Amino acid sequence: MAYDSSTWEVVIGLEVHCQLLTQSKIFSGAATAYGAAPNTQADPVTLGLPGVLPVLNRKVLEYAVKFGLAVDAKIAPRCVFARKHYFYPDLPKGYQISQYELPIVFDGHLDIEVDGPDGSKTVKRIGITRAHMEEDAGKSLHEGYVGQSGIDLNRAGTPLIEIVSEPDIRSAAEAVAYLKKLHQLVVYLGVCDGNMQEGSFRCDANVSVRRRGETKFGTRTETKNVNSFRYVEKAIEYEIERQIDVIESGGKIVQETRLFNPDTGETRSMRSKEDANDYRYFPDPDLLPVVVTSEDIERIRATMPELPEAKRARFVEQYKLPAYDAGVLTGEQALADYYEAVIATSKADAKTCANWVITDLLGALNKLGKGIEDSPVTAPMLSGLVVRIADKTISGKIAKDVFEAMLAGEATGDDAADQIIKAKGLVQITDESAIVAAIDDIMAKNPQQVTDYRAGKDKLFGFFVGQAMKATQGKANPEALNRLLKEKLAG
Amino acid sequence: MHTLSIKEMSEGLRAKKFSSRELTAHYLARIERHDGALNSYITVTAERALKHAEAADARLERGDAHTLTGIPLAQKDIFCTLGVKTSCASKMLDSFIAPYDATIVQKLHHDAGMVMLGKCNMDEFAMGSSNETSFYGPVKNPWDTTRVPGGSSGGSVAAVAAGLAPAATASDTGGSIRQPAALCGLTGIKPTYGRVSRYGMIAFASSLDQAGVVARSAEDAAHVLQAMSGFDPLDSTSIERPVDDLVAGLGASIKGLKIGLPKEYFAEGLAASSREKIDAAIKTLQSLGAEIVEISLPNSPLSVPTYYVVAPAEASSNLARFDGVRYGHRAEGVKTLEELYKRSRGEGFGAEVQRRIMVGTYVLSHGYYDAYYLQAQKVRKLIYEDFKRAFERVDLVLGPTATDVAFGLGSKTDDPVAMYLNDIYTIAANLAGIPAMSLNCGFVEGLPVGLQLMGNYFSEARLLNVAHQFQQATDFHKQMPKAYV
Amino acid sequence: MSLSPENVKQVAHLARLELPAEKIGPYAQQLSNILDLVGQLSGADTAGVEPMAHPLDMHQRLRADAVTEPDRREAFQAIAPEVDNGLYLVPKVIE
């Protein structure tokens, strides 16, 4: 934060466009898959051919309601689609079907954690003004053409919900916290894949500044399509600095749309949007009012997954995990599911399982750059490993080697740990006579060290442990080895 | 053959008095001979028609034919026809070969097996009341070729009136089926909004547009409307309700039928000569047992202003898709996007379409929405309520279709408002969404006069029944303009 | 309500219509006449009247989320003014 926050107050509202995870488009049966060859998913409705008509995808409505319920919002019993008009080549009909006066979701909120004045975390509530259903636009491609652009309409008609926050956000950090929370929520709900690189979750930031004590908001700018959490932070910070500079040097902020350039970290005015738009909204006469009954809402509510906050609280309560562990494990639905699968099948100690998942598994996945869904070590595999630690077949130390082997793909299947333990002969030696034999052998070979130890050189105990482990290839049960070694050395 | 009714054609085909190929060839020959003077077709699909006629003959032979299989039909050029130019009579779509079929095209040609003769001329994008706004030139009225056929379905009515098609599809946003049917002496019906799918009908004003048919008699119209009606999952405004049998009830008596005459429809503005014919028709209906009741539709004077807000507003939006990017006219040598849009649209749309786009853009724009659009939607409700009250008292409402017989070509082209007032009696049915039809009730100096019947929602069968009974008692519908007999 | 030639230019810009200079005057006159006609609406008493967007008292039907449309790019682009490699070409889009 480079600006003087005792002089300036920042006001931020975010608009998030979230692509809904449907098979087909919002108003037609064309596919929504990402990455298809240009215009191969552009059917007559997507292309806006003369005479075609839209019919609403049931799943879009259900997902919008689901989102509304998750942010504790009101669900409109009757909402209306409206046409928003502007000419742009990626907008085939010359209007976007959106919602204007009567959105499906309104008056919700999301709680985020922010840094309190003393460095502690406090909870801040960000209002969600509304969320509405609308269709996405296509894409303009500029590379490879001189003086021309190519238009790909595959994305046009992909269902979106646009989630509009209240101007409750006061810093770039808060904006990021809100976005991360929202992202986690929509992915949890299964309504969005959350893929920011592919544009499934996009953010426009409305930023203004005012001197502390002012009651009126300053003029705001809208920075478009900032597509990573880091860029959101950078774009907002840049915009704050820029606006303060303009005001401090006697200028005025122009209400405009700006574009963030990730290469320079700057925002610039978008020429194409300069032309103050008159969107001429009116209710789309091709679509009828959308009615959602309380029975519909209850039916959709019944399909809601456990949400992150509730799950985190349950993990603390049910598994007696520290809040930190519970937070990490519930960060993603898939991770939480993984963890619970390991516990359920291994019946092992919850904290042990948590350590394995958080430290070993996430650490390894991080290095591999993989997500939990693509983990080479599946939940049953890790479970099989944890079971073998619990039943003392292997030591915790050997278990790390087995885990590495599983990660390297040396065995697959639910019994991968057992396969590796067997193949490598890693079964722990618990037979005390075998351990005693090894100890006797070491003591016989190292009489000087035995004498020194008995003379009070306690540190040498570690030497004997090391030798014994070496002799048993690390397979001696550590607890038995310690006990027996102490007895023998004591004479 | 072109004087036969559709029922007679169907029977003739089955009795092998003639084949569909012969019937089709007969109409194609008539088009060849007469349409130069009338300009009722934009595209004649002769080769295709003959091929389809042969397929229809084969289907008749197989015995799995529909009543309408093998009977020729003309399509208004507002309906998308796969592989056939669909221009909406606009330069904008002069190059547009539709890549899909409208639902009614599917129903009439693929399901019922009717043979498409071609695509009929019309006012550009269905905007007009005289068929003079067509990019392909005006259509002439077969009863007097110095006069207009009415619009926007001018090509459809001229073709049927001159015996260049047994029937034709048409569309009606503010009277575009009924007014031309009246001016050319035909029977034309616009069903209840939502009864016929709009999918594939190029949109003018979505909340008003409804497809229908023009034919020589109520019976002919009933057969075709039956085949094109019904629920379509591709149209959100299509009604999920079984279609009544429109043919079975044609012969029912109309004794005791209560007909309302709205006093506003018989006030100043209606030509006395037309009024005489309508009065005579009322007497005929009375003689058939109908009771006449005077009613009032007090908000009718507001229907034209309401329409000329709602329709242009929706049109300005519906026509925004014509931008020269994916199909349609694209201006040559454009350097910037803005030029692409402005020049393609400036060149592609004719003056009347441009006027309506501008009116619509204006009434929807910031600061004017409430005063114009929202107010119009409220008045629309009042007009709807007028009808609702009327239908509590009467079974149907009767009035003139047009203020007068067909007017001269070019006589109103310079005055849009005068042209708009042609639709004064027809617009209310579109605003309310109720079914309405026009039928010939006589001639003034050799020019047909139209009688309009309006019914409550889904009363198509009743309207056709009343019209059919009238036509059983009269022979106006059987007359043809002399040059085309 | 009367529209000036300047108003007509603004509306034509919003509607993306290029109008030849000599047509702007006549359009201004015609559009003013049309607005006078529709201006009659302001006299109607509509206090408490619900606007009617649609003749039907129905609500929106929903379709199943299923892919039903095959790729027909070739057919759709056969009628396009200018395409290349499956893309529709337009003069450069400047953002």
Image (cartoon, rainbow, N blue to C red):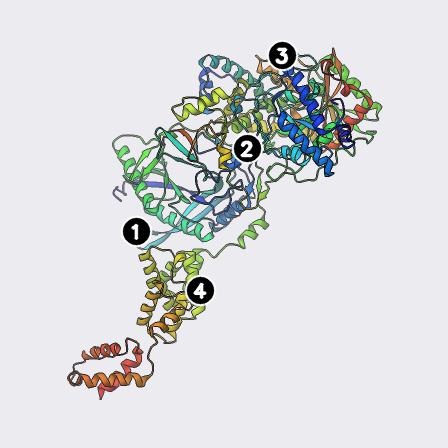
Q: Sequence order check: which comes first, mark 4 or mark 1?
A: 1
Query: Do the numbered discs 3 and 1 sit on residues whose CB atoms are within 8 Å?
Result: no
Residue B42: give its label.
none
- For the residue labelled by badge 1, is the local secondary structure a helix, a strand or a loop? loop
- Residue B193 seen from this side: yes
Q: Is the same chain shared between marks 4 and 2?
A: no
Q: Are marks 4 and 2 in contact (CB under 8 Å)?
A: no
- Which chain hosts label 4? A
- Kindly indicate whether the residues beneath marks 1 and 2 are on one polypeptide chain: no
**Is residue A378 toward the left or the right of residue C62 in the image?**
left
Q: Amino acid at mark 2?
A: Pro
Q: CA distance from mark 3 to mark 4?
A: 82 Å
Local secondary structure at mark 2: loop
Give how far apart the Cα atoms at labels 4 and 1 are: 40 Å
Left or right of A191: which side holds A5?
A: left
Q: What whole-number distance in Å separates the C-alpha atoms at marks 2 and 3?
A: 35 Å
Q: Are marks 3 and 4 on the same chain?
A: no
Q: Which residue is mark 4?
A: A341
Q: Which residue is mark 3?
A: B409
Q: Is residue A385 visible?
A: no
Which residue corresponds to mark 2? B99
Q: The residue marked by circle 3 belongs to what chain? A: B
- From the viewer's perspective, is the residue at label 1 or at label 2 nearer? 2
Mark 3 or mark 4, whichever is nearer to me:
3
Labels 2 and 3 within one chain? yes
Q: Nearer the viewer, mark 3 or mark 1?
A: 3
